[in-house]
Image (cartoon, helix red, strand yellow):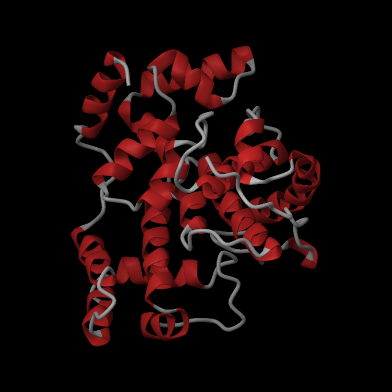
Amino acid sequence: MNVQALMLKKKIQGMENLPTLSASVTHILRLLGDENVNASKLHEALNRDPSICADMLKVTNSALFGLRQRVTSVEQATALLGLRAVRNIVWSASVVSVISGREKDVWLHSYSCAMLMHSVIRSSNLQVADDMEVTALIHDIGRIVVMDFSELSNRVINDVAQRDLLPIHLAERQVLSASHDTIADWLLELWNMSPSVRIPVSLHHQETIPDQYLLETALLQLVDYVDLRARGVPASPPPPPLLEAAGIDRAIIPELVAYQEAQVAQVDGNSFLAGTADAHGSRPPSLAVRAPQRR
């Protein structure tokens, strides 16, 4: 990291208006980190925060989880889904509270990426980290940080992107010396987010081939690119060496874009966290992922 980026990181991590996790969410996540947590103690902590409970139930009943029955309480969610899934729901609900009320385009893109991630993993039967929907939902939180960091810089970034028809992350690098994936990682570092989320998020606009979470990183780049293409937004495709190392055939991209165009139309036309897991009963084409190459 160069000196300019180090200075920017220090400024951003010192922002007074940097998105933070509430004390109750931090406490709940700490409880969920203990596999032997007392259920009644966990339910008490969850029910003590009506806001997080409401967002949890919205996420649980959304297309992200595709449950056949409606969940009406955190107790039911815990019993039905288990602690690991509830942890992911709490993270998702926290992200929803940060992003959904802000920039509409960022929120819609984040949510439809999470839906696509869920559908691709399920249809292709991929063995990946169990928090990939959270990863997709949170991947552009750095854009919210950029908006809060400097209204002027954000306006210049958007102007440069529109003038030069650039993907937004390239315009950010021109203006700030760092793109929103890197900036997101600076925030997630403060949140003590797990490496299974941090690594893919921090690399979703990089050419780096990571030693850990290779398939997860490639999937996030793929899902992000496909959704942006489906929305007609300038985007940089995933680097071929990354997809090759992860065992993903680039030839599947046009089919995924066509599939996602139908999903985007449904997501954007529905209310908050609405929609079914797959529009019109369709499913995304299988990735037929080969075993990732050993490095």
- Which of 222/13 is in front? 222
Does residue 53 sit above or below 175 in this rendering? Answer: below
Q: In this orientation, does residue 55 appear? A: no
In the image, residue 189 above or below residue 196: above
User: Hey, which quadrant is residue 6 in on the image?
Assistant: top left
Q: Is residue 71 left or right of residue 12?
A: right
Residue reaching furthest to the front: 294
Q: Position of residue 34 (x, y in %)?
A: 25, 73
Q: Is residue 219 in view from this perspective?
A: yes
Residue at the (47%, 43%) spot, across then down: 200
Give the residue drawn at x 59%, y 49%. 113
Side (left or right) of 159 relative to 192: right
Q: Nearer the viewer, residue 32 or 157?
A: 32
Figure check: 123 above or below 76: above
Q: Which residue is pictured at 56% across the width and 48% down the height?
A: 215
* Image quarter of the N terminus: top left
Q: Give the image location of residue 137, x and y in percent.
A: 49, 51
x, y percentage for residue 270? 64, 58
Total marks shown come to: 0
Q: Position of residue 258 (x, y in %)?
A: 80, 46
Residue located at (42% from left, 14% from top): 175
* 3 on left or right of 122: left
- Who is closer to the viewer here, 136 or 96? 136
Above or below, comparing residue 189 to residue 155 in the picture: below
